[in-house]
Image: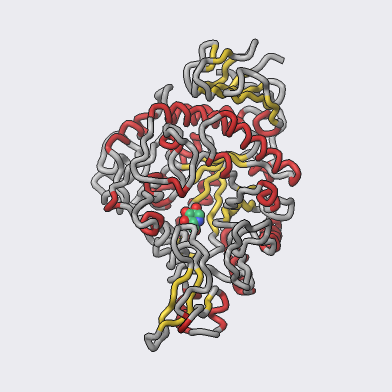
């Protein structure tokens, strides 16, 4: 393997690290269990920092680690300033952030501004204080419609299916007001028109930035502002017309968060979870005084099809260019069917509404494509997200129904398997009661691991030249070493026909991905740097190659 880095070649300044960073997503509950209670924890992550450093990541994003009743895997925060005891202590988090930084890895924490836990002290106070109280103004409490207020204030539908309002009971036992929750009833929405809500969240940002967090991931970022008139959702809402999605007033909030982030010597970074089909509206969140980047879900939702992926890459880059923000590339996360499973399906696109038990998949095909996809996304301009376990090629696990914990499953009436299949604890070793997730003989992992995962464990893949782990390590290291992959724009290459994605970055690097069924020749004079499968003079079907090109 050759590399093309020239001594002293330009790299982004360190304050711009996020523009082309590799960010690894840790789902703390399932990464590594330090104390053997069956739940992952911060001690577990600390013991595996060397693994992440060697993998070649620049930052870790942690899904919520705060005190939480875990009604939605921690996206129901009871207290932002406390670590959930199942994961450790605040001191553990501070030590982890510092140790990671010494290993060259920055930390991104998750902030969940749309809602808090129904066990948060604000919500408990609001319930106790009753209708018309200032405590209730921090939320969306409302009288019901119809006789006796028995009908909910709107018919808005939850992102988790079902209703978005729950009725409270007055202290005397009579039915009371309703409160809004776009997700589960255990996640009441807060009212962003209230100054306490703004002040508290900015304090939370400072709390974590002061402890060394390099940035935040903003949960459900486009949902947080509501139309106080509470109208129904129009049939085809125009831009800014939806009562609880992507409202124009939202941008003022992120502008003030940006001022908080920019006040630090190394400015902190805002990463938005923004699910919006409209690319232009999406890009508005990335104007220079708002967020730095946002997850690109369009690419992740597309099927394994050259036309679709080319279109997604093109529109993504075009949408980002006017605001000067880098794109992000995301193959999966803790909400999404694992790529190895998804890409082996007849319909390999992703859509929450289409998730069903027992959808057939060809895992060998899926694995080949997931390997090629890993090379493709790592070669695109912008930042790259890697969800824990994708570097091992884990498939979506078939979690037995009786073990499922995800509220999405229950709210679908048991039709949707939910998201636990991508949240199963990682296999680190070939043997042991939890395949090295926790100490041997410790409690069973909180979700059962498939026995076949012994062969997908870190131990099994380490040093195997054909393994997914080896491919990821090589890819991330080479990406780090190639200046063009940090700075050069993408130029499409006309090579191999419609089923092939081919592009250059700079004048010496090319990536060719064959999504068709026939082999395609390598471009003349090119040398293979890295390949996701056999690449002997040709690029086979479902294979990607990185090339050093003649110049
Ligand atoms: C998006 C998060 O990724 C998901 O896991 C969570 O359930 C919802 N937001 C609600 O917080």
Whole-percent x, y for residue 221 in the image:
59, 57
Whole-percent x, y for residue 223 in the image:
58, 60
Q: Residue furthest left?
A: 441
322 and 431: which is toward the camera: 322
- Quarter where residue 406 is shown: bottom left
Residue 480 visible from this viewpoint: no
108 with respect to 408 (left or right):
right
Q: Residue furthest right?
A: 322
Whole-percent x, y for residue 79 in the image:
48, 67
Coloring scheme used? secondary structure
* Point 71% across, 31% down: residue: 489
* Point 42% across, 46% down: residue: 355
- Quarter where residue 429 is shown: top left
From the image, which quarter does the N terminus lie in?
Answer: top right
* Point 62% across, 61% down: residue: 242
* Point 58% across, 13% down: residue: 521
Q: Is residue 325 above or below residue 156?
A: above
129 and 476: which is toward the camera: 129
Whole-percent x, y for residue 453 in the image:
32, 36
336 and 388: which is toward the camera: 336
- Quarter where residue 364 is shown: top left
Number of numbered discs on residues: 0
469 with respect to 524 (left or right):
left
From the image, which quarter does the C terminus lie in?
Answer: top right
Residue 252 visible from this viewpoint: yes
511 and 478: which is toward the camera: 511
């Amino acid at each position: 393997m050759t590399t093309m880095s020239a001594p002293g070649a330009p790299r982004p300044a360190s304050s711009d690290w996020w523009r082309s960073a590799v960010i690894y997503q840790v789902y703390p509950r399932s990464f590594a269990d330090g104390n053997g209670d069956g739940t992952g924890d911060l001690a577990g992550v600390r013991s595996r920092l060397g693994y992440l450093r060697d993998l070649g990541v620049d930052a870790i994003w942690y899904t919520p680690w705060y005190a939480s009743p875990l009604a939605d895997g921690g996206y129901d925060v009871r207290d932002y300033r406390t670590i959930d005891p199942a994961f450790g202590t605040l001191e553990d988090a501070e030590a982890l952030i510092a140790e990671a930084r010494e290993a060259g890895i920055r930390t991104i924490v998750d902030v969940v501004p749309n809602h808090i836990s129904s066990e948060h002290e604000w919500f408990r106070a609001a319930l106790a204080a009753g209708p018309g109280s200032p405590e209730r103004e921090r939320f969306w409490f409302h009288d019901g419609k119809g006789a006796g207020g028995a009908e909910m204030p709107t018919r808005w539908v939850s992102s988790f299916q079902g209703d978005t309002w729950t009725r409270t009971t007055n202290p005397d036992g009579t039915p009371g007001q309703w409160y809004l929750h776009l997700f589960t009833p255990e996640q009441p929405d807060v009212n962003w028109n209230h100054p306490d809500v703004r002040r508290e969240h900015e304090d939370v940002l400072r709390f974590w930035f002061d402890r060394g967090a390099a940035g935040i991931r903003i949960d459900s970022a486009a949902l947080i502002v509501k139309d106080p008139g509470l109208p129904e959702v129009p049939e085809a809402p125009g831009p800014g017309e939806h009562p609880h999605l992507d409202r124009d007033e939202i941008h003022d909030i992120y502008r003030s968060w940006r001022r908080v982030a920019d006040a630090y010597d190394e400015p902190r970074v805002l990463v938005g979870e923004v699910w919006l089909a409209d690319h232009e509206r999406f890009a508005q969140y990335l104007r220079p005084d708002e967020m730095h980047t946002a997850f690109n879900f369009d690419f992740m939702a597309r099927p394994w099809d050259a036309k679709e992926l080319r279109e997604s890459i093109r529109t993504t880059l075009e949408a980002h260019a006017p605001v000067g923000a880098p794109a992000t590339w995301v193959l999966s996360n803790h909400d999404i069917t694992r790529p190895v499973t998804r890409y082996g399906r007849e319909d390999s696109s992703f859509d929450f509404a289409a998730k069903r038990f027992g959808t057939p998949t060809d895992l060998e095909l899926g694995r080949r494509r997931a390997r090629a996809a890993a090379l493709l996304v790592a070669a695109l301009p912008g930042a790259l997200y890697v969800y824990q376990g994708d570097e091992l090629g884990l498939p979506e696990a078939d979690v037995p129904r009786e073990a499922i914990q995800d509220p999405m499953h229950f709210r679908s009436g048991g039709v949707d398997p939910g998201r636990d299949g991508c949240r199963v604890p990682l296999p680190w070793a070939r043997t042991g009661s939890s395949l090295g997730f926790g100490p041997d003989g410790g409690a069973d992992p909180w979700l059962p691991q498939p026995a076949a995962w012994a062969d997908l464990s870190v131990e099994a893949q380490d040093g195997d030249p054909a393994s997914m782990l080896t491919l990821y390590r090589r890819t991330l290291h080479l990406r780090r070493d190639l200046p063009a992959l940090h700075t050069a724009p993408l130029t499409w290459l006309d090579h191999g026909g419609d089923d092939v994605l081919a592009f250059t970055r700079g004048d010496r690097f090319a990536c060719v991905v064959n999504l068709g069924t026939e082999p395609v020749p390598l471009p003349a004079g090119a040398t293979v740097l890295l390949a996701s499968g056999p690449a002997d003079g040709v690029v086979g079907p479902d294979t990607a190659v990185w090339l050093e090109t003649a110049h």
